[in-house]
Image: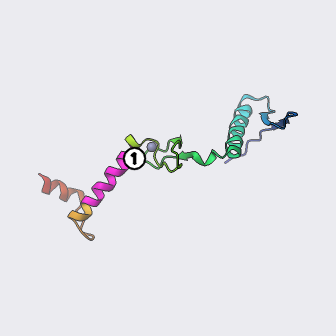
Amino acid sequence: MALLPCRLTVTADPAGDVRLSSADQHPFARAVGAVAIAIAESAASGTWTRLKSCPGRRCGWAFYDRSPAARSQWCSMQLCGARAKMRAYRGRQARRAYPGDQLPRPDQVLESGT
Ligand SMILES: [Zn+2]
């Protein structure tokens, strides 16, 4: 990963409010600075831990956890959450049907299902 330098300016008004702004001229460096400022402001306000990455298969979306307890795991309970629950349910069903290490190979499942 390469490092991209970006310069930020800190200004404070007489009321004591502190503000960060990008001090770069290049548009890409200004965009990186804007992201850095958003991260710093989120960390300062305590909302950074609510920005999460969905662990759903082939998902990986970033989402903001708006739940009261900040314990959401999925980007969408209707999509990734429901799929994970269904996968867990089917796994439990398979373990009940084939206890131990006797899970059938996929071709065996097809043969017995036809
Ligand atoms: Zn997801």
- Does residue 80 show up magenta in the picture? yes
Return the x and y of residue 26 as percentages of the image width and height: 76, 29
Query: Toward the viewer: 24 or 9?
Result: 9
Return the x and y of residue 13 as percentages of the image width and height: 86, 33
Q: Is residue 106 left or right of residue 79?
A: left
Return the x and y of residue 59 as percentages of the image width and height: 45, 43
Q: Residue at x 28, y 55 (%)?
A: 90
Query: Splitting the image into 4 quarters, where does residue 33 fall?
Result: top right
In the image, what residue type sits under mark 1?
A: Gly
Q: Residue furthest bottom?
A: 100
- Coloration mode: rainbow
* Magenta-drawn segment: 79-93
Residue at disc 1, secondary structure: helix
Query: Toward the viewer: 8 or 111?
Result: 8
Residue picked out by circle 1 = 81
Return the x and y of residue 86 as percentages of the image width and height: 31, 50
Q: Residue at x 71, y 43 (%)?
A: 40
**Dominant secondary structure, magenta:** helix
Badge 1: few (under 14), some or many (20 or more) residues near its Cα, within 10 Å?
A: some
Q: How many marks?
A: 1
Q: Is residue 57 left or right of residue 41?
A: left
- Does residue 102 show up magenta in the picture? no
Q: Residue furthest right?
A: 14
Q: Residue at x 81, y 36 (%)?
A: 17
Q: Is residue 99 left or right of residue 52?
A: left
Establish if 113 lies above or below 39. below
Query: Toward the viewer: 32 or 84?
Result: 84
Q: Quadrant of ligand 1?
A: top left
Q: Is mark 1 within 8 Å of ligand 1?
A: no
Query: Splitting the image into 4 quarters, where does residue 25 fall?
Result: top right
